[in-house]
Amino acid sequence: MKYVGIYGNSNPNFIKDWVEVQDETTTTSPPTFSGRTCTFSGAYNLRFYLTKLGTTSNPQYKISRIRLVPQRISWVHRIPDTTASQDFYAQLSVSFHETPQDDSEFIPKPPNRLPKLSRNVLYPFFIYDSAATFGQVFAVGLLAALFLVL
């Protein structure tokens, strides 16, 4: 596991929708043996760091960082013959941690559903004038509509 999507529906073609897993298992110390006990990194904790985004009434979470952290455990041979095989169980745990939102994180407001029209959208038929009354604007608009129909 190298990358994990930061959202539930991350785009596989958009690199910013993915975060790399920080694998700390490469820096583990070698196993130690003492009699029938072997101590080594046999348990792993996958830590998800989440950042809350959006409004307080409808928060959304984004994965900001992931770490795979090894934990040292001790296994004890219970069979008198230490060369005989014995079953041991590996452990994997998952933990979630909430981190504060970064101040540099910019969340743009949603786009307007209707495009903005210029004031002179009816230019050949009407030029915006702040002194024009509603009746004048309506009359010019009606004339423009009749002209287009005929």
Image (cartoon, grey):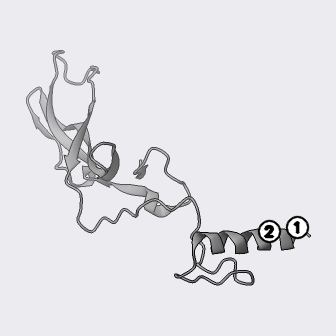
Residue closer to the observer: 84 or 119: 119
Secondary element at tag 1: helix
Residue 149's tag is 1
Visible residue check, residue 67: no
Whether 26 is drawn above or below 130: the answer is above
Residue 110's tag is none
The amino acid type found where label 2 is placed reads: Ala
Whether 123 is drawn above or below 8: the answer is below
Residue closer to the observer: 39 or 92: 92
Residue neighbourhood size for the residue with mark 2, other residues' Cα within 10 Å, grouped as few (<14), some (14–19), many (≥20): few
Q: Is residue 42 left or right of residue 118?
A: left
Residue 57 is situated, as x and y percent measured from the top left of the image, at: 29, 42
For the C terminus, the quadrant is bottom right
Residue at image location 60% in from the left, 73% down from the top: 117
Residue 115 is situated, as x and y percent measured from the top left of the image, at: 59, 67
Asked whether disc 2 touches disc 1, contact meaning CB atoms under 8 Å apart, the reply is: yes
- Residue under circle 2? 145
Measure the alpha-carbon separation of dots 2 and 1: 6 Å
Q: Residue furthest right?
A: 150
Residue at image location 59% in from the left, 78% down from the top: 118
Whether 72 is drawn above or below 53: the answer is above
Visible residue check, residue 121: yes
Q: Residue furthest left?
A: 34
Residue closer to the observer: 68 or 94: 94
Residue 15 is situated, as x and y percent measured from the top left of the image, at: 48, 62
Whether 43 is drawn above or below 16: the answer is above
Residue neighbourhood size for the residue with mark 1, other residues' Cα within 10 Å, grouped as few (<14), some (14–19), many (≥20): few
Quadrant hosting residue 40: top left
